Image (spheres, grey):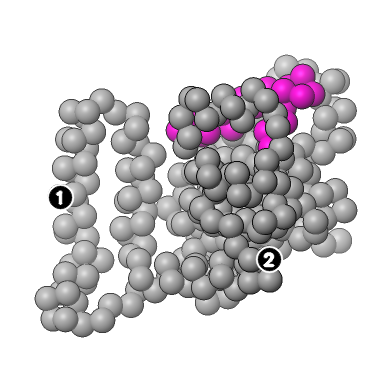
């Protein structure tokens, strides 16, 4: 039996490929757990510096699968809470990862699948990609993704997406700031790979981890707290090995490759 998530590393780029094409890569409890496990492996893999999340099949991820939706009606509150918390933990793991995570979307990314794609640090999509938070159309709510969407887009834009449940294309997603770029379908794989390689060679892992930590924490703080926290992080960074290496290379006019 093939794994639900295929992991491979090429040029220090770790690929997590969703591999449930016959179900449009729809999310089930077991699938979410396997994505979490694969992501944990990539985060701990010293051969992987940047992570790319992609999918086999016509859809990136169509949200919860039919069996899971049917089971919701029979679950106890405790069972539904455990299921919800697992998905929330996956989103949080992506959001707080010390490594850069890029999603490569070439098909439908709906509901929970839309959250999965857009929570990543970068999201590259082909023109054929479709996005939607469709929960309100089936009497559900986009509860978990809302936490991140409000941070990314603000209340007005989040309302437009979440309250309508409408499907929109990659260009509209780009205009809203939900994704990073729309790429040619014939070259999206190579362009994503080259972008990831560039990050591998031109950015410090220590700097990326600290910057991502700050991006998560700063919005939670008041102005004075944020300034104090930033000053402390700035001071800590100056004594890091990567900073010493970077400054030395700059002073010696040496080309630096990470």
Quarter location, residue 89: top right
* 238 is higher (above) or lower (below) than 28: below
> Is the N terminus in the top left, top right, bottom left or bottom right quadrant?
bottom right
In this view, the residue in front, 175 or 62, is: 175
Q: Earlier in the sequence, mark 2 or mark 1?
A: 2
Q: Residue at x 22, y 70 (%)?
A: 246
Q: Residue at x 49, y 67 (%)?
A: 196
x then y, percent, for residue 212:
38, 48
Is residue 139 a member of the stretch shown in magenta? yes
Nearer to us of marks 2 and 1 is: 2
x then y, percent, for residue 47:
50, 71
Specify the segment rendered in magenta.
132-151
Q: How many marks?
A: 2
x then y, percent, for residue 166:
70, 32
Is residue 142 a member of the stretch shown in magenta? yes
Residue closest to the far left: 251
Residue 5 visible in the shown view: no
Q: Residue at x 72, y 23 (%)?
A: 136
x then y, percent, for residue 227:
18, 35
In this view, the residue in front, 240 or 214, is: 214
- Which label was assigned to residue 235? 1
Q: Quickly name the residue at label 2.
A: 185
* 46 is higher (above) or lower (below) than 24: below
Where disc 1 sits, the SS reads helix
Going by the image, does 213 lie left or right of 243? Answer: right
Going by the image, does 27 lie left or right of 154? Answer: right
Secondary structure mainly formed by the magenta segment: helix
Where disc 2 sits, the SS reads loop
Quarter location, residue 146: top right
């Amino acid at each position: 039996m093939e794994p639900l998530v295929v992991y491979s590393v090429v040029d220090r780029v770790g690929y997590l490929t969703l591999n449930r094409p016959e179900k449009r890569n729809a999310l089930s409890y077991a699938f979410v757990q396997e994505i979490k496990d694969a992501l944990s492996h990539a985060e701990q893999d010293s051969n992987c510096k940047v992570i790319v999340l992609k999918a086999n099949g016509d859809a990136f991820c169509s949200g919860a699968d039919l069996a899971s939706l049917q089971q919701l009606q029979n679950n106890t509150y405790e069972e539904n809470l455990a299921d919800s918390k697992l998905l929330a933990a996956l989103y949080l793991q992506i959001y707080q990862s010390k490594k850069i995570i890029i999603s490569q979307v070439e098909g439908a990314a709906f509901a929970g699948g839309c959250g999965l794609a857009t929570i990543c640090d970068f999201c590259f999509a082909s023109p054929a990609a479709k996005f939607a938070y469709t929960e309100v159309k089936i009497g559900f709510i986009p509860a978990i993704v809302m936490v991140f969407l409000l941070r990314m887009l603000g209340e007005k834009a989040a309302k437009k997406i979440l309250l309508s449940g409408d499907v929109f294309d990659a260009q509209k997603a780009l205009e809203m700031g939900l994704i990073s770029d729309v790429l040619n379908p014939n070259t999206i794989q190579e362009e994503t790979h080259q972008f990831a390689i560039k990050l591998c060679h031109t950015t410090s892992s220590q700097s990326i981890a600290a910057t991502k930590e700050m991006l998560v924490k700063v919005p939670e703080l008041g102005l004075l707290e944020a300034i104090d926290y930033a000053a402390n992080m700035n001071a800590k960074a100056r004594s890091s090995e990567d900073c010493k290496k970077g400054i030395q290379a700059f002073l010696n006019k040496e080309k630096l490759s990470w």
